[in-house]
Amino acid sequence: MDQCHGAQDVVQCHLCDTIGPPMYCDFCHVHLCKACVGEHLSDESKEHKVVLFKKRGSTTACPKHSASISVLFCTQCDITICATCASSEEHRCHIFFEISKIFDGKKEVIQRDLQELEISIYPRFQEIASNIPIQRADWNKNSQKLSIAINEHGENLHTEIDIAIKRLKSELDEISTKRLDFLNKQENEIKGTISEIIQRIADLKKLLNSKDASLVSGYKSKNDVFKKLPSNITISLPTFTPLNVNQEFIYQQFGSLSTLLLTEKETGNAIQSPGVFSPLQYRILIDKPQVVTEINTEQSVLNVACQSDDDVWVFGDKYIRLFNLQGELKQLVQTKSGNVPSDIAVTRTGDLVYTDGDEKTVNIVKRTHIEEIVRLTEWRPLNVCSTVSNDLLVFMQKDDRTQSSVVRYSGKTEIQCFQGGSGVLGLYSSRGPLQIFKHITENGNLDICVADGEAGAVVVVDQAGKFRFKYTGPSFPLKKSFVPISITTDSQCQILTVDLSTFRIHILDQDGIFLRYIDNCDLCNPWCLCMDSKGYLLVTESTTGKVKKIKYCM
């Protein structure tokens, strides 16, 4: 204890008690003045490592040989080692650096990291954290605003429905008044005639009992007047035919929530926020998709289209069948030509549409009547889908298989065509044995998506026909070629497609980025896909005749 420093401990040389020795033995953990270093090193019974006092602790024992000092750093093993380790077989051909060089370099890195954390990173995290309550408040405020907008829009729709109800009731009252007035008039006329007949009967009875010869002999019959009976009045009763309630169509007509990606300038993080009103529910892909319903059609099934959340159309031959979720056949439609359809779809108003490639027609089924809406000459319509605007998108191929095309129809009128001269020449394949393996759908962002099995790609263009991207499989290599044969999209604008080569279902985002597979639902030759309004995926199995309803997100 140094008297000049009172109760404070004073660092002294271990050998001569000199105060403030500048050296330190990292191996023996003792303080040394310069004069005593040589004496300390003369003890050869153990190893020593004398360093400047400020660098004490920089020397460590070898992790494998505790009695030896780590003097080297192995870059392959990322550990400190002694000279014995360096000459061992374990570190043969490894690259070493002196610890002192590594030590100083690492200190510089640590200093830079410390400065960066204190000066740059930590303040930015604080800034971002302080901004979250503001974002949360803005989100809640905007959500309340959207909720009010949704309610107001709903009230407006209810008002329109009430107006429609009043109009129909008014029409019914007007028809009823006219018909009832007519019936009342007819009733009064008949009752008047009946009164005359009753009076005539009474007069004739008096004549029969009369002895007045002149009165009886002057009688003239008037029965011919009464023989002209009034026609038997039958008024046809009006009926009210409600249209089928298409829940998906109502959702689409009601509105949707746009999802805006806002980029935070400093961090570059993408932040999702509510944009304008519309009820889109954010959904998350689940780890293990599961089959919730299995429809056994007991038929060969090629394609499927949702009539509603409870009924699906399927076909495998010339008959298009409507099944409920219990597998009960509800309706049977035979194609007009007797040919097997190329594809089927359900319009936004609930009508069944099918293409007939052999007849080169597109047909719509209204109850039991089949109406031809498109007839082509040099082109064969293969696949069809209904759009949000209730148009039809038809994928077709020229008879000589030199061109493929996508055509948009509004009713019977062609309003848009994507083919050769429109700037997408070569976009879709047109030759080869897999020409039938094409399927078309419209995404929620109005992109047009085609599964082109022949080309081994999902081809996506925007609503104007401008090329957006082509998906040929995930970024990691596939063991087999990619052959997409069916396609559908969901409420998140995610794209789902069946790969014929592996019978896996690929899920992509709207920009073609692979997200995950669906390959765990005991799918046996999955063939065609469609989505119901509640976000369940329906998958046909071509060999079993089953349609499986799969929950893949929540």
Image (cartoon, helix red, strand yellow):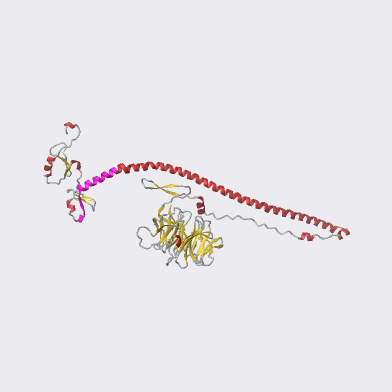
Asked if residue 152 shows in the view, the reply is yes
- Write the residue at 67% across / 57% down: 235
Q: Nearer the viewer, residue 324 or 506?
A: 506
Residue 409: x and y in percent read: 51, 59
Residue 1 higher or lower than 26, as above or below: above
Residue 178 on the magenta span: no
Task: Describe residue 170's horizontal placement relative to residue 532 as left or right.
Answer: right
Left or right of 13: which side holds 406? right
Please determine whether, in this image, residue 360 is positioned above or below residue 57.
Answer: below
Q: Is residue 107 magenta?
A: yes
Residue farthest to the front, as pictured: 421
Toward the viewer: 98 or 461? 461
Q: Give coordinates of residue 464: x percent, y percent.
A: 46, 56
Q: Is residue 405 depicted above or below 13 in this figure? A: below
Question: Magenta region's main secondary structure?
Answer: helix
Q: On the image, which quarter does residue 49 sit in? A: top left
- Picture quarter containing residue 478? bottom left
Q: Residue 43: x, y in percent?
A: 11, 44
Task: Name which residue lies at 52% across and 47% down.
Answer: 153
Question: How many numbered marks are there?
Answer: 0
Q: Quadrant of the N terminus?
A: top left
Direction from residue 210 to residue 499 in the image, left or right = left
Q: Is residue 292 visible?
A: no
Q: Residue at x 78, y 61 (%)?
A: 224
Q: Nearer the viewer, residue 322 or 513?
A: 513
Q: In the displayed structure, does residue 163 sit left or right of residue 145?
A: right
The magenta stretch spans which residues?
89-115
Residue 146 location (% of width, % of height): 48, 45
